[in-house]
Amino acid sequence: MLLQPTTTVSPKHVLASIDESYECCRQITAKYSKTFYMGTMLMSEAKRRAIWAIYVWCRRTDELVDGPSAKFTTEATLDDWESQLESVFAGRPQDDYDVAMVDALEHFTLDIQPFRDMIEGQRMDLRCSRYETFEDLKLYCYRVAGTVGLMSTVVMGVDPEYGTAPWATTIPCPIDEAIALGIANQLTNILRDVGEDARRGRIYLPLEDLELFNYSERDLINGVIDERWRALMRFQIQRALKFYREAERGITLLSPDARWPVWSALMLYRKILDVIAENQYDVFNRRAFVPTVRKLLCLPPALLRARVL
């Protein structure tokens, strides 16, 4: 479990050094997101360290609602966490993990708004456990994951050559594509975790989609796997793939040293959808994961795409 957010620093507590803080962030990223961590190891040191700091902040934010102490989280808890965020952006770390974030902010011009938006996504989890339409779910996906795309794109950087062409008036930035990748990843998470979420009383699949396939909430809670469910899951997977395809279009615009890691991360995460299908869409009793060998096999084609696309 991660350290819980704090809003004050004890006068007697000496915060971790910058290197110590980044090492803590690295360890947490490696432990809790092996696929994502593999992608970061292909980046330059400065970029991967900043990404680790962002990942840990995002994970701590998520744990406020989904972690071991989530039952104690209230709107006031999130208000306090947002105040701590403001302190970080003001250069005042409140705990050991903040130290890395403050340092990352000195090297990369991150905007606070995507961080605020992510906290709003956690508020949505406090307020509701169902989503009527995909548009409702899409807003949630943006807030809890599309925001990560915005944060990460700033660190990744854009290929400066796009701004040096004689006809160039501005340097393009793949903002929409970055958000699309975050949404695609979150939709993948939702499909992988249907059973786990149902056991916690949450249904993220849009209720209008359940109705479209004549599949009820009770069916989902009971883990019914039949042709209705398989058709519903195929429909959801195709939707996620659409966002992955949209995200692909923006990778070419990224800084050359970021393309391979992003292609790798995209391809690795998308593989989870393949495993779900291979498991006959049983996400109630089997957790879809990509074996290490298959992950490694993604790296050469990802490198090829990074160089030629």
Image (cartoon, rainbow, N blue to C red):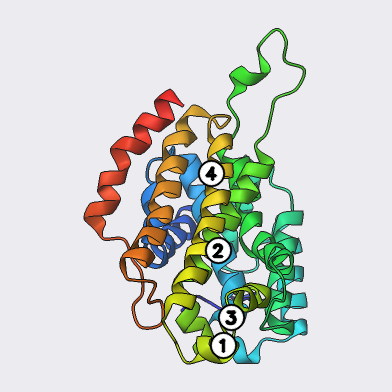
| Image-based side of 272 in relation to 65, left or right | left
Amino acid bearing label 4? Arg
Asked whether disc 4 touches disc 1, contact meaning CB atoms under 8 Å apart, the reply is no
Q: Nearer the viewer, residue 223 or 64?
A: 223
In front: label 2 or label 3: 3
Labels 3 and 1: the sequence-earlier one: 1
The residue that appears at 48% across and 69% down in the rendered structure is 231
Q: From mark 4 to mark 3, how far is it between C-alphas?
A: 29 Å
Labels 4 and 3: the sequence-earlier one: 3
Residue at numbered disc 2: 187
Q: Give the residue furthest to the left.
A: 293
| Image-based side of 174 in relation to 41, left or right | right
Residue at numbered disc 4: 245
Amino acid bearing label 1? Ser
Q: Position of residue 202 (x, y in %)?
A: 59, 84
Q: From mark 3 to mark 1, how far is it between C-alphas?
A: 36 Å
Q: How many C-alpha atoms fall within 10 Å of the one at disc 1: few (<14), some, or many (≥20)?
A: few
Q: Position of residue 5 (x, y in %)?
A: 62, 76
Quarter of the image where one finds residue 169 = top right
Labels 2 and 3: the sequence-earlier one: 2
Numbered badge on residue 214: 3
